[in-house]
Image (tube, rainbow, N blue to C red):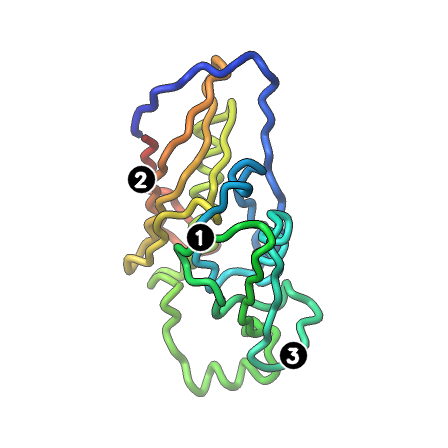
């Protein structure tokens, strides 16, 4: 594990801001959010392709952005939790500010799409967002975030949406790199960069490497 240099903060109460967002397929996804000050200064648009439409819409809306969901088929979008993002009007890495309009192209998840089971068996294809062991981007990110909470019990806030630097499918495992805020036993806070490697499947993800610096 990497080491951190902590800067003692002024004697004010520490506020832990965690947002419980929408349920993905069989898994509750807890994501770090940007602070009001960060939102006011503008942030970079993350890559949200493959994630829950409801999760991303709620997160961006809470941060002051205007979000529209555009279905590719089977619309309109009545239950966003049944849909996933397949495209975004603002490219990943572009600067965004509260009040900006963001259009997300979405499609029904396979389990909810009409006739999806027949189509899947007739034309099976490999999902580039899923490792060979059956681990997707969202579950890998959740595993990293939860591992961070265990390692930093005095305070942890992983920015696994707006603070993502990299989230790569590397064959049989996922590599995540993202920003986080951590607190030590003396109530000293620090901004950090996290590198996390996760193997296993969606049912049993395993963090095999975790570095904070």
Cα distance between the residues tagged 1 and 3? 30 Å
Cα distance between the residues tagged 2 and 3? 41 Å
* Crowd class of label 3 (few under 14; some 14 to 19; many from 20; radius 10 Å): few
Residue 7, given in percent of the width and then of the height, sits at: 41, 17
Q: In this view, does 116 lie to the left or right of 6?
A: right
Cα distance between the residues tagged 1 and 2? 31 Å
Seen in the picture, residue 97 relative to 36 is either above or below; the reply is: below
Q: Mark 2 points at which residue?
A: 209
Question: Secondary structure beneath disc 3?
Answer: loop
Residue 152 visible in the current orientation: yes
* Crowd class of label 1 (few under 14; some 14 to 19; many from 20; radius 10 Å): few
The earlier-in-sequence mark between 2 and 3 is 3
Question: Secondary structure beneath disc 1?
Answer: strand
For the point 28% across and 60% down, the residue is 171
The mark lying in front, picked from 2 and 3, is 3
Residue 187, given in percent of the width and then of the height, sits at: 50, 16
Question: Secondary structure beneath disc 2?
Answer: strand
Q: Name the residue under label 1.
A: 95
The mark lying in front, picked from 1 and 3, is 1
Seen in the picture, residue 93 relative to 177 is either above or below; the reply is: below
For the point 39% across and 64% down, the residue is 129
Quarter location, residue 190: top left
Q: Mark 3 points at which residue?
A: 75
């Amino acid at each position: 594990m990497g080491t951190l240099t902590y800067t003692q903060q002024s004697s004010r109460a520490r506020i832990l801001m965690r947002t419980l967002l929408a349920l993905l397929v069989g898994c509750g996804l807890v994501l770090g959010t940007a602070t009001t000050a960060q939102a006011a200064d503008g942030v970079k648009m993350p890559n949200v392709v493959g994630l829950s439409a409801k999760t991303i819409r709620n997160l961006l809306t809470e941060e002051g952005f205007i979000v529209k969901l555009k279905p590719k088929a089977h619309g309109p979008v009545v239950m966003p939790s049944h849909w996933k993002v397949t495209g975004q009007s603002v490219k990943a890495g572009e600067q965004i500010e509260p009040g900006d309009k963001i259009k997300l192209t979405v499609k029904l998840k396979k389990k909810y799409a009409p006739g999806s089971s027949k189509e899947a068996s007739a034309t099976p294809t490999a999902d580039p967002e899923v490792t060979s062991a059956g681990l997707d981007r969202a579950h890998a990110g959740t595993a990293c975030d939860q591992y961070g909470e265990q390692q930093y019990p005095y305070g942890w806030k992983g920015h696994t949406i707006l603070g993502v630097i990299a989230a790569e499918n590397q064959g049989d495992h996922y590599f995540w790199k993202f920003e986080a805020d951590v607190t030590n036993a003396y109530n000293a806070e620090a901004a950090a960069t996290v590198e996390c490697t996760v193997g296993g499947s969606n049912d049993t993800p395993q963090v095999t490497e975790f570095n904070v610096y």
